[in-house]
Image (cartoon, rainbow, N blue to C red):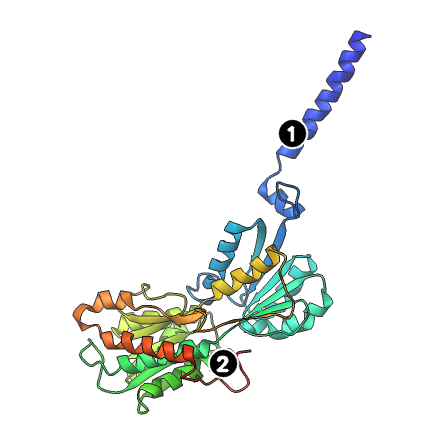
Amino acid sequence: MKVKSFMRVFTMLLVFLMVVSCGGDKKDGDQAAGGTSEGGKKKLRIAIVHAGFLGDKSFNDSANEGIKKAMAEYDIEVKTLESKVPSDWETNVVSMASEGYDLVIGNSSQFQDIIKKHAPEFPNVKFAIIDTVVDEPNVMSVVFAQNEGSFLAGAAAALFTQKTDVPNVNAEKIIGWVGGMDIPVLQDFLTGYKQGATYIDPDTKVLVSFAGTFNDPLKGKELALAQYSQGADIIMNVASNTGNGVLEAAKDSQKYAVGVDINQDDIYPGFILTSMLKRVDVGTYEVIKSVAEDKFKGGEILKMNVANGGIGLTDMSVMKQALGDKFPEDILTTINELTEKIKSGEIKVESYPGFKFE
């Protein structure tokens, strides 16, 4: 009897150890597949779909910074999908919703029609769109007053093109602007840029080019070089990865540029006057936070502008260090004054018709 009892206990102990061993061998990938965290709580699953690629040092990378901040603070699993061609966009959004991700983020205004079409098909999935509005009960939208930031960038460029004591700034009052695709949100950038430039000096000429893509740095460089050859001293890029070509053209031509979305001032120090900050990182983070803290509200619009710090310019410290005594301090002073006037409502920045900050 004692032998039988011992064998029964030994067998039970062996089974128990096998179960514990199997359970303790779970890897991060297994956790993600199971959708549970260490405490047994359902792991929050987030998918973000880009209209282009990470590594653009602009819009997409800014969104990714928000993702990384959220991952550091919340127990979440993140799936990132990049897109080579526009035909990938709808497939990626629908596939993530079909797989039951808790939140699917479309990181571009170009996902507007796609999310509008498919969000009703997945009522239990939360969606978010960055840079435009989709009015559906399970969609949260993040919009930016990029026209306000571009107003400040246009003003800074118009002031800078007058500074003929700065190396390679000519006597002509010509500035440039290179965009990616000709879409409403970029037209809104351009509207503010032109208004800011003419606010400083109505005689300022603005050269405009669209590359037709956000993923072609060579095209961006070609367009920028053409504008420099036409007399532009400084060019703003609003073109994601295409815009990296604009910045490179500034360096190669010993001319100047304006960065966009994130701080690009130190990509080519001394050739980028300032960058227009569009806090996509903050918008992306806030959307994920709302889901993680069970405060997501479908139909809500998160608005980011100059007044609340969601839009602005860098402090030009990189350029200041590069130019030394030749740095035109009055540009900073004027930009700070204009910023306060926009905040107070004294300056009303125009929007592109059909694209309103709402």
Which residue is the extreme one toward the right?
A: 1
Measure how far apart labels 1 and 2 are at the Cα level. 58 Å
Rendered residue at 65%/62% (across/down): 126
Q: Which mark is residue 182?
A: 2
Which x, y percent locates residue 293? 60, 55
The three-letter code of the residue at mark 1 reads Ser
Rendered residue at 60%/55% (across/down): 292
Which residue is the extreme one toward the top?
A: 2
Q: Nearer the viewer, residue 284 or 34?
A: 284
Badge 1 crowding class, 10 Å Cα cut-off, few under 14, some 14 to 19, many 20 or more, is few
Q: Quadrant of residue 238?
A: bottom left
Label 2 SS: loop
Q: Is residue 343 visible?
A: yes
In the displayed structure, 9 sits above or below 179; it is above
Which residue is the extreme one toward the front?
A: 344
Which residue is the extreme one toward the bottom?
A: 203
Which x, y percent locates residue 25? 61, 34
Q: Is residue 211 visible?
A: no
Q: Quadrant of residue 258?
A: bottom left
Q: Nearer the viewer, residue 208 or 62?
A: 62
Q: Which residue is mark 1?
A: 21
